[in-house]
Amino acid sequence: MSSEQTLILVKPDGVKRGLVGEVIARIERKGYVVTNLKMLTADRTILAKHYAEHEGKPFYEPLMEFMASGPIVAMVAQGERVIEGFRKMAGATDPTVAEAGTIRGDLARDMGTKVVQNIVHGSDSPESAAREIKIFFGN
């Protein structure tokens, strides 16, 4: 099996709380390699491409507002089964039920907002990873 790549985002809540280094440290300790990294404030154009499959859903607008509310850190991580591995490291989307030891289980908290503020995003498939990496890093 060949090495794969995934897009990982540290969302505005993670950046604001100073958790970027912790997220990167966990990725590297797992043996994955960060091959590209940048901080940006995502505009609506980038976010609309990234969240295209959610357009029209009740949480779409609040999600767009949250993700544009401050800087994010986008990175490409590479390694064997990195997509599956990072999603396991990230933990359940809902931070209240995310297992201890996961990024969300240890670091995220339910803020009682319309949008789950859960520190990180990770691509869910090789196809999504390729599409999302292109959105944030181009070719």
Image (cartoon, rainbow, N blue to C red):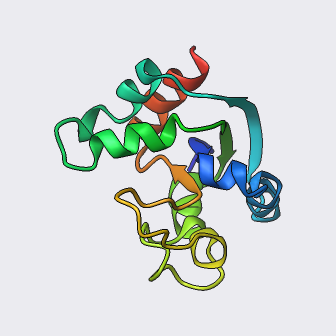
The answer to whether residue 81 shows anywhere in this view is no
Which quadrant is the C terminus positioned in? Answer: top right
Q: Residue at x 28, y 42 (%)?
A: 60
Q: Residue at x 55, y 38 (%)?
A: 69
Question: Considering only vertical position in the picture, is 114 above or below 108?
Answer: above
Residue drawn at (61%, 46%) of the image = 12
Q: How many marks?
A: 0
Q: Residue furthest top?
A: 139
Asked if one can make out residue 72 in the rendered structure from this viewpoint, the answer is yes
Q: Is residue 34 left or right of residue 60?
A: right
**Picture coordinates of residue 116, whole percent (x, y):** 42, 61
Seen in the image, is 65 located left or right of residue 27? left
Q: Identify which residue, 62 or 127, lies in the foreground.
A: 62
Q: Is residue 1 above or below residue 109?
A: above
User: Residue at the spot x=57%, y=65% of the render?
Assistant: 90
Which sits in the foreground, 16 or 52?
Answer: 16
x%, y% of residue 36? 74, 31
**Rendered location of residue 24, percent (x, y):** 78, 53
Looking at the image, is 132 positioned above or below residue 85?
Answer: above
List the single residue furthest toward the left: 56
Q: Camera-side residue: 110 or 100?
A: 110
In the picture, measured across the screen, residue 96 lies left or right of residue 26, that is: left
Foreground residue among 117 and 97? 117
Position of residue 10 measured from the top left corner of the image (x, y, whole percent): 63, 48
